[in-house]
Amino acid sequence: MVDYTQIEGPVPGKTMKVTFDGTFVDGVVEWNIDPKADKVDITCAKSTNDVQYKSYLATLVDAPIQLKLAYRNLSDAGQKKLWDGLGGAKKELRLYEDATHYCFCDAYVESFPLGAKVDDAQGNGITINLQIQDPDGVQFPTAFD
């Protein structure tokens, strides 16, 4: 299970960073990971006819991941690794909150949208979706290794 006690209080995001397959990804302005358990509805009728609420059984944990970019630049080694990893083999992803607190897992790139807008920077605000593919789940060490 995730140990959130290792992240103590609010920290400024200016030292936030992301690495994919050991390479720093430039242009990231936000990352999100949303671990959650799937569920199965196991509600059934009772002979007493007093079922008031549904019942659920927690099953497997999933963790969709999103990286938001300020700009797209496929000449950046990190962004290029993400692009090349689209639908490919899983790679190690590290998500840093600051210089010492991060989580990591193996993940693959699920989507990397392309687009342009006449009055904006190329790729501004695009969101790259990754999917965890790690039997150990999301891990939270205390510092750089």
Image (cartoon, rainbow, N blue to C red):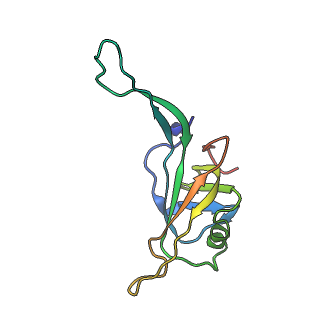
Identify which residue, 81 or 51, lies in the foreground. Answer: 51
| Total marks placed | 0
Q: Is residue 72 left or right of residue 44?
A: right
Q: Where's residue 63, x and y in %?
A: 54, 47
Q: Residue at x 52, y 76 (%)?
A: 114
Q: Position of residue 125 (x, y in %)?
A: 44, 71
- The image quadrant where one finds the N terminus is top right
Coordinates of residue 89 in the picture (x, y in percent): 71, 58
The residue sitting at 51% across, 44% down in the picture is 35
Depth check: give the residue in front, 49 or 3: 49
Residue 21 position (above or below residue 36): below
Q: Residue at x 59, y 51 (%)?
A: 100
The outermost residue toward the bottom is 118
| Most distant residue in the top direction | 48
Which residue occupies the foreground of this view, 41 or 65? Answer: 41
Question: Residue 74 falls in which quadrant of the image?
Answer: bottom right
Does residue 139 appear to the left or right of 123 in the view shown? right
Could you say where residue 8 lies in the image, as x and y percent from the top left? 48, 42
Q: Is residue 47 above or below residue 132?
A: above
Comparing 44 with 30, the one in front is: 44
